[in-house]
Amino acid sequence: MFTSVLMIEKALTSADVEFVTTLHGDEAVAFHVLLQPRGDQADRLLRAIDDVALGEIDEAAREGDTPEGDAAAGQGEQALEVSLLALRASGSAAEGRLIEDHPLDALKTLVDEVEADEVIVLTDPHYVEEFFHRDWASRARHKVGVPVLKLFSHSKV
């Protein structure tokens, strides 16, 4: 069985589930999902810039209304559970957890624990971080010791 660590930031859509579960053809895949709840206020400006770059001005204006940090943990738990149920419904083995410490440390630990074959980072576009190679996938490539695939979510939830 192929083992993938799937790093996400929101609930998977049905299109996302189909995308990641068909990457390896008919080979069985076990997913170990890490979900990073929304960060602290320092991330808010970067998300607003991404929204503007995507032409989503209304989203940029609403960034201040979205729970951050500890207040986002409940939503994160719910998004993780929805994602795990969707992966299991597709026939894949899936387990997961919220990221509580530094995301890349949690990723490296999980990759080592489960002896992962790959890491898939599935997020919305983050233009500022990607431009400076500070996004999760770029940074993970130097840390985890397995191939890292960066994919963009198919739609917003």
Image (cartoon, rainbow, N blue to C red):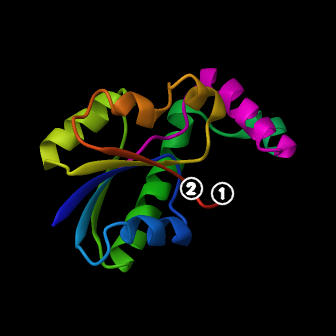
Proximity of marks 1 and 2: CB atoms separated by less than 8 Å: yes
Q: Does the magenta segment cover residue 70? A: no
As drawn, 69 above or below 93: above
Q: How many marks?
A: 2
- Residue 52: image x %, image y %? 80, 37
Q: What residue is shown with label 1?
A: 156
Residue at image position (23%, 41%) is 146
Q: Residue 135 location in percent, x, y?
A: 50, 31
Q: Is residue 28 above or below residue 141?
A: below
Residue 111 percent location from the top left of the image? 21, 42
Q: Residue at x 29, y 64 (%)?
A: 94
Q: Amino acid at mark 1?
A: Lys
Figure quadrant of the N terminus: bottom left
The disc at residue 153 is 2
- With respect to residue 54, does 18 lie above or below? below
Q: Nearer the viewer, mark 1 or mark 2?
A: 2
Q: Residue at x 49, y 56 (%)?
A: 79
Point out which mark residue 15 bears. none
* In the image: residue 20, left or right of residue 72: left
Say if the magenta span includes residue 46. Answer: yes
What SS does tag 1 mark? loop
Magenta stretch: give its range: 34-58
Regarding mark 2 in the picture, which secondary structure is present there?
Answer: loop
Quadrant of the frame with the C terminus: bottom right
Q: Residue 64: which quarter of the image?
A: top right
* Label 1: few (<14), some (14–19) or many (≥20) C-alpha neighbours in 10 Å: few
Q: Amino acid at mark 2?
A: Ser
| Position of residue 127 in the picture relative to residue 14 (left or right) | right
Asked whether, in this view, residue 100 is left or right of residue 111, the answer is: right
